Image (cartoon, grey):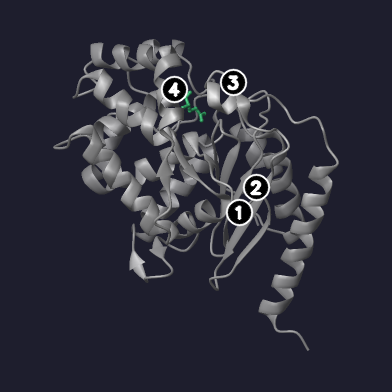
């Protein structure tokens, strides 16, 4: 007679194997984010997935141990740190509404006087980086983010890919425009190049699906880091970050993701997605090809299969 834990483990193993099998047969990968040169050179056939469950196990398949550029997934961790520093005062500088626009849209920012709609679009994340800079040199702010990620993932191997950071800076003209405009509106407290330096390097953090799934556990388990039992954030704050992930984590594709996948998620243009199944699991998936919203195409499809097969949803 199998225990519930053994049953869940077997089921999860079978579902992940089936997902890997399905993905391997597909060739319609989507587009690489070649506006950041090194991301345009990644093999689009790469695919990894990892699921960290409540009891401390990690189920993985494919290239789950290969580091990739987490890009905007870093915005979840930066937001967590910024809320720890300034609490709800953050919401005077960044909103909590879905933008309905692309992640690097400029037009809405002018209409809304330099206050970004949410912390997950680029403009909002640049404000969050400005908050992390308070009292710090950019290097120290980044060091703090990196230490936080290593702690969350129980893994000292998380690193910043400096080649990606350099490429981001070289081609980051839209982000420069967003930061300069917010400076003009008084919504940056540090020189734009400093906030951008933190932003570009945080987007260039490289992690594997396994590391990322482990790092996301505090969001799935009431704000607690399961391996140490330490509280990372209050349960209420974990819920709020999850709410923002659900409503804003996939930019103008957030409604689509909520409809098809049904759980909070945050994507990055490196092709990664972190998904949170509250009380059950933290999941990371990676497939570099992107859909029309700039979110991982197969990553989204894989999460849809996973949540459907496992009957996971925040909607009942
Ligand atoms: N670094 C990327 C950019 O600024 C992040 C975008 C993303 O992952 N959606 O364009």
Q: Is residue 175 left or right of residue 214?
A: left
Number of callouts: 4
Disc on res. 194: none
**Quarter holding residue 83:** top left
Upstream in sequence: badge 4 or badge 2: 4
Can see residue 118?
A: no
**Quarter holding residue 179:** top left
Residue furthest to the right in view is 25
Can see residue 2?
A: yes
Q: Mark 2 points at which residue?
A: 262
**SS at mark 3 in the image:** loop
Q: Name the residue under label 3.
A: 34
Upstream in sequence: badge 3 or badge 2: 3
Q: Would you place residue 152 above or below residue 11 in this image? A: above
**Quarter holding residue 258:** top right
**In the rendered structure, are the residues bearing label 2 and label 1 in contact, judged by CB atoms less than 8 Å apart?**
yes
How many angstroms separate mark 3 from mark 2 (CA)?
29 Å
Upstream in sequence: badge 2 or badge 1: 2
Q: Name the residue under label 1.
A: 314
Upstream in sequence: badge 1 or badge 3: 3
Q: Which of marks 4 and 1 is in front?
A: 4
Q: Mark 4 points at which residue?
A: 168
Q: Would you place residue 183 above or below residue 304 in this image? A: above
């Amino acid at each position: 007679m199998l225990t519930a834990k053994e049953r869940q483990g077997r089921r999860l193993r079978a579902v992940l194997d089936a997902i890997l099998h399905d993905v391997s047969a597909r060739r319609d990968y989507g587009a690489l984010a070649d506006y950041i040169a090194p991301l345009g050179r990644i093999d689009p056939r790469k695919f990894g997935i990892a699921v960290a469950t409540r009891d401390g196990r990690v189920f993985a398949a494919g290239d789950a141990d290969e580091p990739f550029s987490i890009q905007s997934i870093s915005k979840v961790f930066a937001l967590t740190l910024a809320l720890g520093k300034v609490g709800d005062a953050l919401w005077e500088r960044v909103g909590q509404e879905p933008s309905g626009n692309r992640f690097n849209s400029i037009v809405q920012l002018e209409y809304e006087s330099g206050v970004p709609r949410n912390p997950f679009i680029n403009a909002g994340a640049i404000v969050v980086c400005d908050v992390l800079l308070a009292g710090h040199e950019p290097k120290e702010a980044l060091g703090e983010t990196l230490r936080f990620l290593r702690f969350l993932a129980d893994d000292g191997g998380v690193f910043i890919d400096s080649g990606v950071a350099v490429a981001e800076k070289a081609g980051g003209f839209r982000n420069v425009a967003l930061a300069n405009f917010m400076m003009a509106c008084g919504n940056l407290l540090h020189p734009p190049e400093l906030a951008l330096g933190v932003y570009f390097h945080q987007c260039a953090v490289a992690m594997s699906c396994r590391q990322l799934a482990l790092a996301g556990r505090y969001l799935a388990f009431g704000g607690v880091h399961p391996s140490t039992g330490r509280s990372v954030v209050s349960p209420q704050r974990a819920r709020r970050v999850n709410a923002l992930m659900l409503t804003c984590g996939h930019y103008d594709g957030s409604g689509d993701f909520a409809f098809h996948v049904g759980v909070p998620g945050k994507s990055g243009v490196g092709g990664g997605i972190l998904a949170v199944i509250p009380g059950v699991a933290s999941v990371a998936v990676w497939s570099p090809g992107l859909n029309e919203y700039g979110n991982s195409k197969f990553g989204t499809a894989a999460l849809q299969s996973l949540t459907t097969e496992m009957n996971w949803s925040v909607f009942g």
